[in-house]
Amino acid sequence: RHLRRPCSRRDCQEPRAIVAATTRNPDREKLLRTSGVDQVFIDTGSIAGQVREVCPSGFDKVLELVGTTTLKDSLRCAKQRGIVCMTGIVGNKWSFDNFAPMEAIPTAVSLTTYAGEAEDFMRTPLAKLVEQIAAGSLHVQVGKIFRLDEIVEAHRCMEENKAGGKIVVLTWPRLGRFALAPLRKKLVGSRLSLLATLLFDLLVDPPLVAER
């Protein structure tokens, strides 16, 4: 679960939010903070009490990734006129056994969902995100990298929650920079050089990532 509220500092040069995240594993706090999280809540099944101690009025936005098993608690973490968006069902439960809207949804809190359809993906500003990644202002935590023939191990890593970041599956063998150096040289001179070379470097010669 992720929670955010606007940055209140007057010296903020870029639009940003103060971001909080939850984890059931206290050992993951350092990893989350390295990834840019400002506040970490240890999820024991309910975090609303912890949230109100840090932010008494609640958060402006709450992103619910677990699903219906924690949604009612997440709704209690939002401030009035705040928004809770459910976009994940990793809790493996798709519906409420008993749902009373007047009881579950606090006054003036909005509840919505996001499914991530094709048109949503097309509106994603990929070029801008790549520029931010290249500049180091946007950090993407890559946990483990697998080949396609290691898909069983990749799925097991995901199920056991051992990746410590995004899981990347490559669809062709590692050939190395030397063998494909001429191709990379052409990409550098192309109009899509920034995006193409970043993808080339990741897919052809990915970094070695230790298992967490």
Image (tube, helix red, strand yellow):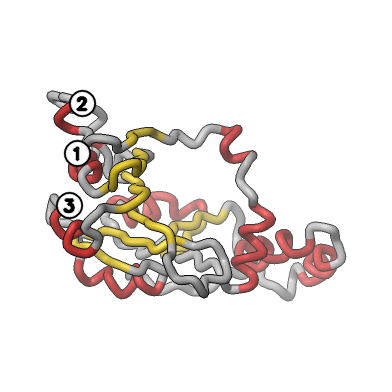
Q: Amino acid at mark 3?
A: Ala
- Dividing the picture into quadrants, the one containing residue 96 is top left
Query: Dot 2, crowdedness within 10 Å: few (<14), some or many (≥20)?
Result: few
| Disc assigned to residue 101 | 2
Distance of mark 3 from mark 1, alpha carbons? 10 Å
In the image, is 148 to the left or to the right of 20?
Answer: right
Looking at the image, which is closer to me, 203 or 1? 1
Percent x, y for residue 153?
37, 55
Distance of mark 2 from mark 1, alpha carbons? 10 Å
Residue corresponding to mark 1: 72
Looking at the image, which is closer to me, 166 or 80? 80
Whether 210 is drawn above or below 146: the answer is below
- The numbered mark, 3 or 2, whose residue comes first in the sequence reads 3
Q: Secondary structure at mark 2?
A: helix
- The numbered mark, 3 or 1, whose residue comes first in the sequence reads 3
Percent x, y for residue 123?
63, 41
Whether 138 is drawn above or below 78: the answer is below
Q: Nearer the viewer, mark 2 or mark 1?
A: 2
Proximity of marks 2 and 1: CB atoms separated by less than 8 Å: no
Question: Quadrant of the image for the C terminus?
Answer: bottom left
Q: Secondary structure at mark 3?
A: helix
Query: Dot 1, crowdedness within 10 Å: few (<14), some or many (≥20)?
Result: some
| Disc assigned to residue 48 | 3
Distance of mark 3 from mark 2, alpha carbons? 18 Å
